[in-house]
């Protein structure tokens, strides 16, 4: 992304809007790089229930969340330029995003998570190695439990919504009847 790239033409505006959606090019590049390092993760997941927004990549066991930030939308210190038309409108929008970013980072930190920030201008291979180091170190800090290990196998898939009660959960309860000891 070069300077002066935030022109106010309809085409640019359209691309700015496109940048807000999920599965952006930088996100996909980062995910590919992480996957190539053997890391498995959840995509667009909520790290903790108290936070409404999702993180782009989530390592639940290591408690590491990754956000890929667009240079325009999140006010990159190197590349953000207010568009020439409606500069106030755009700056306020970006400032709102930045406040939300700060709030999310604070809440994650308080919940014992680490938030890794990757800018869209970053080299995704370099970023993935940095994240790998943090994740592996954190897994060392939080020894996995048997259940967590099992859950990790499918972490790279986007899981469908939780199965409704009545499928697996309830039948497993039936299999363990409580029999009082005969005295
Ligand atoms: Zn940037």
Image (tube, grey):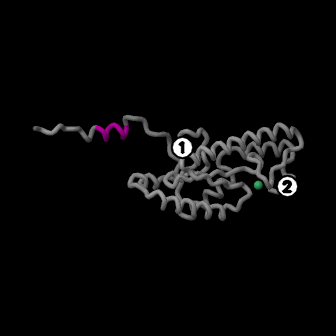
Q: Is residue 87 left or right of residue 172?
A: right
Instruction: Quickly name the residue at label 1.
Output: 48
Q: Is residue 125 left or right of residue 39?
A: right
Residue 3, disc: 2
The image position of residue 34, as x and y in percent, is 59, 60
Q: Is residue 38 above or below residue 105?
A: below
The verdict on label 2 being within 8 Å of ligand 1 is: no
Could you classify mark 2 by the number of other residues whose Cα lies within 10 Å: few (under 14), some (14-19), or many (20 or more)? Answer: few
Q: Is residue 156 visible?
A: no
Q: Earlier in the sequence, mark 1 or mark 2?
A: 2
Q: Please tell me which residue lies in front, 32 or 98.
A: 98
Report helix, strand or loop for mark 1: loop
Q: Please tell me which residue lies in front, 156 or 126.
A: 126
Q: Is residue 77 above or below residue 20?
A: below
Point out the stretch of residues depicted in magenta. 167-173
The image position of residue 36, as x and y in percent, is 57, 64
Q: Quadrant of residue 31?
A: bottom right
Q: Is residue 40 visible?
A: yes
Report helix, strand or loop for mark 2: loop
- Which residue is at 72% across, 54% downward? 120
């Amino acid at each position: 992304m070069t300077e002066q790239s935030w022109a106010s033409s309809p085409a640019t505006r359209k691309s700015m809007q496109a940048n807000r959606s999920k599965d952006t090019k930088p996100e996909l590049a980062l995910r590919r790089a992480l996957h190539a390092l053997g890391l498995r993760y959840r995509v667009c997941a909520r790290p903790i229930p108290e936070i409404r927004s999702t993180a782009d990549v989530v390592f639940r066991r290591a408690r590491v969340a990754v956000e890929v930030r667009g240079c325009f939308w999140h006010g990159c210190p190197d590349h953000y330029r207010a568009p020439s038309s409606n500069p106030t409108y755009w700056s306020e929008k970006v400032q709102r995003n930045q406040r939300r970013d700060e709030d999310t980072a604070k809440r994650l930190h308080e919940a014992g998570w680490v938030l890794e920030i990757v800018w869209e201008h970053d080299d995704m291979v370099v970023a993935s190695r940095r994240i790998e180091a943090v994740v592996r170190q954190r897994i060392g800090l939080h020894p996995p439990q048997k259940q967590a290990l099992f859950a990790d196998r499918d972490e790279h898939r986007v899981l469908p919504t939780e199965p409704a009660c009545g499928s697996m959960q309830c039948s497993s309860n039936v299999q363990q009847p409580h029999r009082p000891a005969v005295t």
